[in-house]
Image (cartoon, rainbow, N blue to C red):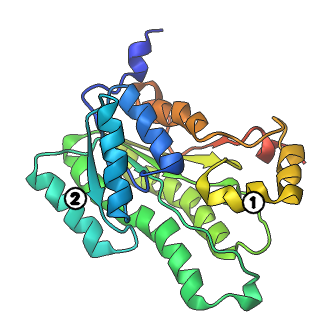
Amino acid sequence: MSTKLFDLSGKTAMITGSSRGLGRAMAEGMAAAGASVILNGVNEARLQEAVEEMKAEGYDVIGAPFDVADEAAIVAAFEKLDADGVAVDILVNNAGIQFRKPIVELETKDWQKVIDVNLTAVFICGREAAKRMIPRGHGKIINIGSLLSDAARATVSPYGAAKGGVRMLTKIMTAEWASKGIQVNAIGPGYMATEMNTALIENEEFNEWVCKRTPSGRWGQPEEMAGTAIYLASDASNYINGQLIYVDGGMISVL
């Protein structure tokens, strides 16, 4: 089988929440596979630094600073890309936040913020991308789920509800768009060694639990998301639709 199936040359990929962490790792992987990349983030200084770093590596990359929790900003960002003649072939809905608190102590505003970033943004960004992909007859959308798309854990109710919703939204997008030539799938990362998880990694008890609970015996590294993202973004996955693939060291598979 030719490796050209995994070649992203001539494609443009937008990855939300990609100035660092999992988003940055997937952006680096797609750029290495030949894609032009649109990085996104709310911190413009950090975003620009990421853009310059990737340009220095020889990649074709631009920044799109917008807040995924702001519908008007998302729409404006896609309209600017239209005006600039940039077509998004691949969308990775990666941006996410976490908020840990027991349900009985959780305020509605904090619940809503997590839902807005982790679920509603997937709907809005996906909608705007699909509006443009459907007339072209092709496109790839990759939504980032979680272990919590399938399993529950205390103190993370809005995150778990959002990630469960991402799994079902992926299936519904497939039901509506597969006949239009669009493949929509999801990736469920396990416990990954990112800045977002620094406090958990530094907690000896929690770190030990993760390593013992994960069959691979360790935290995942951000760059280990890249291969699955490239696969789902490439022609190699053209008949894969509506699936959630776990990149979790085997955690979801065992008791």
Q: Amino acid at mark 2?
A: Phe
Q: Nearer the viewer, residue 135 or 59?
A: 59
Q: Residue at x 71, y 50 (%)?
A: 191
* Rendering quarter of residue 247: top right
Residue 200's tag is: 1
Label 2: which secondary element? helix
Label 1: which secondary element? helix
Q: Residue at x 53, y 49 (%)?
A: 21
Q: Residue 134's x, y, as percent?
A: 25, 48
Q: Residue 111's x, y, as percent?
A: 59, 82
* Rendering quarter of residue 58: top left
Disc 2 residue crowd, few under 14, some 14–19, many 20+, Cα 10 Å: some
Q: Earlier in the sequence, mark 2 or mark 1?
A: 2
105 is higher (above) or lower (below) than 33: below
Q: Nearer the viewer, residue 39 or 69?
A: 39
Left or right relative to 238: residue 200: right
Residue 114's tag is: none
17 is higher (above) or lower (below) than 55: below
The answer for how far apart the CA atoms under marks 2 and 1 are is: 35 Å
Q: Residue at x 43, y 36 (%)?
A: 28
Q: Residue at x 37, y 65 (%)?
A: 42
107 is higher (above) or lower (below) than 15: below
Q: Are marks 2 and 1 in contact (CB under 8 Å)?
A: no
Left or right relative to 100: residue 2: left
Q: Amino acid at mark 1?
A: Leu
User: Which one is closest to the eye, mark 2 or mark 1?
Assistant: 1
Q: Residue 219's x, y, as percent?
A: 74, 43
Using the rendered image of the protein, determine whether residue 40 is visible from the camera's viewpoint.
Answer: no
Q: Residue 114's x, y, as percent?
A: 55, 74
Residue 78's tag is: 2
* Rendering quarter of residue 165: bottom right
Extreme top residue here? 1
